[in-house]
Image (cartoon, grey):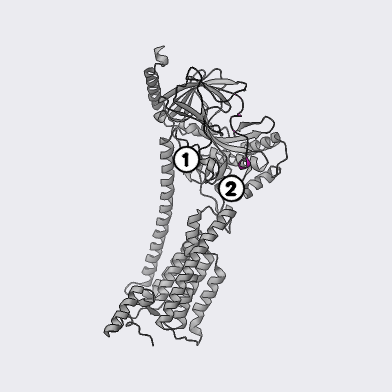
Amino acid sequence: MHPFPPAPPATPPTPRFLLGTALLFWGWHAHLLPAAALVAVAVEGAPLLPIRWQFTTQDYQRLWNGSLALLLGSVLFAIGYGRALSETGGGAREGVDLTPVATRQALLFFQWWPLVFAPLLLASIFGRDEHLPSTVFSWVSRRQQRAAELRGDPPTGSLVALKPVYLAMVLICSSTTNRRSAFFYLGLIALVGWGLWPRRSRRVPGAAWLTLLLLGGTMGLAGHLGITELHRFLANLDTSWLNRFSHNRTNPMESRTQLGTLGDLKLSGRIVLRLQTTNENPPELLREATYDSFSTPVWSVGARGEPMRNHLDWKTVLPEDNGTGWILTTNRNERNEIRISEFLSGGNGLLPLPLGAIRLEDLPAGSLRRNAYGGVKVSDASSLVTFRAAYAYHSTMDHPPTERDRFVPVEERAAVDDVIQTLGLRSEGGQPAGQVLKKVNGYFRGNFRYATYQEEPHTKVGKQTPLGHFFWRKSGHCEFFATATVLLLRRAGIPARYAVGYSVQESAGSQHYVVRERHAHAWCLYWSEKDKAWFNFDTTPAAWNQVEADQASMWEPLADLASRLWFEFAQWRAGRSELTK
């Protein structure tokens, strides 16, 4: 006989079949139902068998140590399995799982706990030991036990009721899966109520106790949903703050899109650029940066870890003799010229320029650099710059396409291929580029609508990427249209990139235009093999201009007046104000 501490006061036993039902509940949610069924049959069938094994404390200690070894092995397996899922782009049994790899690994680790500790539970059941001494689990308790034996004292320590602890662990592990149906919450409340029923106070009527249980479960569900909505609200609020205060802070290395962000996406009506053209045809788009690699929800230049991503191959542009002229590229036919006025934070930042920019004039600055993706960065300029930009129809300043400009992420291919098939295109390419562009443009313009509000994914579409949900819902903002267009063109054999900047759409008088923060835009660039150049390709429905304008504040005219006065003051201070002419 092994010396156990004195038995605790009698407590109601765990209800019959509760543990087995909880194991089946966990196995169904964790996709481990066969293994869960085996353990459940062993647990609930043990009392029906005449078998009884005699286990000593040392036996239980060995089983506990073995369980800890299995736990360590599960850590290593979860890490390796998670990496394999990340590399293959799969891992979800119901579609694509967008859970971050580290989170997925942690969830897998916790989901396996009922299997890891099942041998210890089965040993206690077949050994008819409802309670195990704390010395089985604690090295400190074992030291105290040995010290008591040397003094001749009776066994010390406490006893642990293994079944209730194991039941709680099973329910917690059931909650680490991504299944959040009504059945899950109802099942969880039912199992908890089943376990607590024998322990309820007899002074409280059963009906009242059940009512309080359902009330507590409902409040718990409401709290869970509230926390989820609060998380979404704070995430969107954080994004809006960043959008509000990060103008001129476009990251040339990567752009974190709002793909997958739920709720309403709004930008302010603050004026960020002023344009003057030489005719009534301004450039439709002003580009700040371009990216070639996509991993939901981030577009970047190259993948993380690639050396070129650290410096973007920035090249210094030498000024002309007057010190204010800059030649970005040569041997180009000039199409038009515009004058751009912009406030720069600290006199540094990326310049929004038309595609095909050839040269800049009237731009005094300490230095000017450009990269192979069309980005132009100015340094040591004044806080307000007003310069002229000459441009052509397309860009050869960007370097020719690479394999990254043809790559479609594995997790996006199923949704993209469905559209390719719908349009009658070939995923391997080979069809005329003009035909592809016409079909893609018609697909978006004829079947999709622009929307700044993103809804919860519908249950019928299962687990999809945000882009897959966009194809199903057929509504979204410009980042969805730009991303989808780039990946569709790539799958159809046309190299494409993702560009960000501004749309020029609001007139402020004859040959004058203003660009507001809400005019921030994303679109596609595609490579023409015939012209050996990059062209703009914007498939966002034209109605997006009006949708954004409808969100304007009633105080916007006053804000515009204040902005105009501040602009003129800054111009006057620099000696360039039209009011002084």
Mark 2 residue element: helix
- 25 displayed left or right of 164: right
**Magenta segment, which residues?**
392-404
Residue that lies at the very extreme toward the top in this rendered image? 581
Q: Is residue 360 visible?
A: yes
Q: Which x, y percent locates residue 509?
A: 49, 19
Which one is nearer the viewer's eye here, 445 or 98? 98
Residue 192 included in the magenta stretch of the image: no
Residue type at tag 2: Gly
Quadrant holding the C terminus: top left
User: 520 or 198: nearer the eye?
Assistant: 520
Measured as percent of width and height from the top left, residue 43 is found at: 49, 78
**Residue 437 horizontal side relative to residue 570, left or right:** right
The quadrant of the image that shows the N terminus is bottom left
Q: Is residue 573 above or below residue 31?
A: above
Query: Label 1 amino acid?
Result: Leu
Does residue 85 lie above or below 155 as drawn?
above
Q: Which residue is mark 1?
A: 265
Residue plotted at (38% across, 70% down) = 207
Q: Can you tell which quarter of the image residue 208 is in?
A: bottom left
How many residues crowd around disc 2 within 10 Å: few (fewer than 14), some, or many (20 or more)?
many
Residue at figure coordinates x 38%, y 21% from the top left = 570
- Residue 320 appears at what percent x and percent y? 51, 20
Considering only vertical position in the picture, is 116 above or below 1?
Answer: above
